[in-house]
Image (cartoon, grey):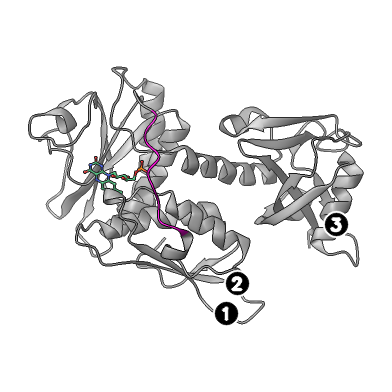
């Protein structure tokens, strides 16, 4: 049987930066990682983390909450890595074991070579940054998408179509969908959009939201702006294909932004969940990320419930859509659930009977 090594790691962050250290010894010398190390016998995870950071960085940290537990198979051993969100108590640190350390901007997290297990955490941190940075973009500059960007988007779309059993399609260089006389809303310069289609089904809306938002956040990481549109578009025959059993649920405009987008008022966590002072940190992060999700007319008609569970069992969260005069609540819920997963971390909880198969 492969040896199992259990470690703790500190994701030390400031609002827009993450602290990374470069291994100065051993097999993984030269790779970047979150500081931390093995739990010694008799130590709690938190005690181990405080000790490791003192030993490696000669620094004091405040441990905020468990972010993620990574299970990773390296060639010679299995790694269980509990990663905690932390802050440095003051700006001082001294490298005792690492050969380098760096504060990395949240939008360039992939600029160093992370160890594979740490890279899993970095992917989620990067998505969380995109969740915070995204706002609906309705004004675009006149700059075509490069073939490289189109290929990347199409690859992401292919993956989402496969997982979600959908027929999402990217339409490029087509200006009538959002800008014609029949299109409403304050959109300008839209030359590309994504047709959010699939076979008619009770679960179509949820899947469109859940997988569509994966494309939206991916686009954000490529430097593109997007806006979901339930009504502000017009169907242009010939721009896409639809089988007879399929329908268009909505569209998403996409392109290079000509504006920063607006920060809109959101509901509070208490209004959209059963959060309390006793709720675990990951649940609070999940609800917060869901609150940053786009919803039709910013209605936020969703609710996340942390279900009572015997201790020791994996926590269960139930997500549901609330009644609305506007509609689109299934799409909204699918989007919000994806955001919740990014904030809460899928290693921390399981969904209870989701309205669709993830
Ligand atoms: C399902 C759905 C449909 C939407 N339809 C439209 C639309 O037709 N026109 C529009 O201008 N914005 C539309 N939006 C964008 C929302 O108005 C926007 O997401 C919300 O106001 C929150 O703003 P934010 O995305 O900047 O956070 C839609 C969003 C969703 C999720």
Q: Is residue 133 above or below residue 40?
A: above
Q: Quadrant of the C terminus?
A: bottom left
Q: Residue at x 42, y 58 (%)?
A: 337
Mark 1 or 2: in front is 1
Task: Please give the residue where the numbered disc 1 appears in the rendered image.
Answer: 309
Residue tagged 2: 314
Mark 3 element type: helix
Q: Looking at the image, which is closer to me, 188 or 118?
A: 188
Q: Position of residue 247 (x, y in %)?
A: 17, 51
Instruction: Report whether 247 appears left or right of 78.
Output: left
Quadrant for residue 245, please give it: bottom left
What is the spatial separation of the Cα atoms under label 1 and label 3, in whole angstroms? 28 Å
Q: Give the foreground label among 2 and 3.
A: 3
Q: Is disc 2 surrounded by few (<14), some (14 to 19) or many (20+) residues within 10 Å? A: few
SS class, disc 1 = loop
Contact check, label 1 and label 2, Cβ < 8 Å: yes
Residue 355 falls in image quadrant: bottom left
70 left or right of 150 in image: right
Residue topped by disc 3: 48
Vertical placement of 137 versus 354: above or below?
above
| Whether residue 290 is visible | yes
Does dot 2 land on a helix, a strand or a loop? loop
Q: Foreground: 263 or 54?
A: 263
Extreme-top residue of the structure: 143
Instruction: Find residue 255 and report its horizontal and vertical position in percent.
Output: 33, 27
Decide whether residue 264 is among the magenta residues: yes
User: Which span is picked out in magenta?
Assistant: 260-268
Q: Taking the image as drawn, is residue 38 in sight? A: no
């Amino acid at each position: 049987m492969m040896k199992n090594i259990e470690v703790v790691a500190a994701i030390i962050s400031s609002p827009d930066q993450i602290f990374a250290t470069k291994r100065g010894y051993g097999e993984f010398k030269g790779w970047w990682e979150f500081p931390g190390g093995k739990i010694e016998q008799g130590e709690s995870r938190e005690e181990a983390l405080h000790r490791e950071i003192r030993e490696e960085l000669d620094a004091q940290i405040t441990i905020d909450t468990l972010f993620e537990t990574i299970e990773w198979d390296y060639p010679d051993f299995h790694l269980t890595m509990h990663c905690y969100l932390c802050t440095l108590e003051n700006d001082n640190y001294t490298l005792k074991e690492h050969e380098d350390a760096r504060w990395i901007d949240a939008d360039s997290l992939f600029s160093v070579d992370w160890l594979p297990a740490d890279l899993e955490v970095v992917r989620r941190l990067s998505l969380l940054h995109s969740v915070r940075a995204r706002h609906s973009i309705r004004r675009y500059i006149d700059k075509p998408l490069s073939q490289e960007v189109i290929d990347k988007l199409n690859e992401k779309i292919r993956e989402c179509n496969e997982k979600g059993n959908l027929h999402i399609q990217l339409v490029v260089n087509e200006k009538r969908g959002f800008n014609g006389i029949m299109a409403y809303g304050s959109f300008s310069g839209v030359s590309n959009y994504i047709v959010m289609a699939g076979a008619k089904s009770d679960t179509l809306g949820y899947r469109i939201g859940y997988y569509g938002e994966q494309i939206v956040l991916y686009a954000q990481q490529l430097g593109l702006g997007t806006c979901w549109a339930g009504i502000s578009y017009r169907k242009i025959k010939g721009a896409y294909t639809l089988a007879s059993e399929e329908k268009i649920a909505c569209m998403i405009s996409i392109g290079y932004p000509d504006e920063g987008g607006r920060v809109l008022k959101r509901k509070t966590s208490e209004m959209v969940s059963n959060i309390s002072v006793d709720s675990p940190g990951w649940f609070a992060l999940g609800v917060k990320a869901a609150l940053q999700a786009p919803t039709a007319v910013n209605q936020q008609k969703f609710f996340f419930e942390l279900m009572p569970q015997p201790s020791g069992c994996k926590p269960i969260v139930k997500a549901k859509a609330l009644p609305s005069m506007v509609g689109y609540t299934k799409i909204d819920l699918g989007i919000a659930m994806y955001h919740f997963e990014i904030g809460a971390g899928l290693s921390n909880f399981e969904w209870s009977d989701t309205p669709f198969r993830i």
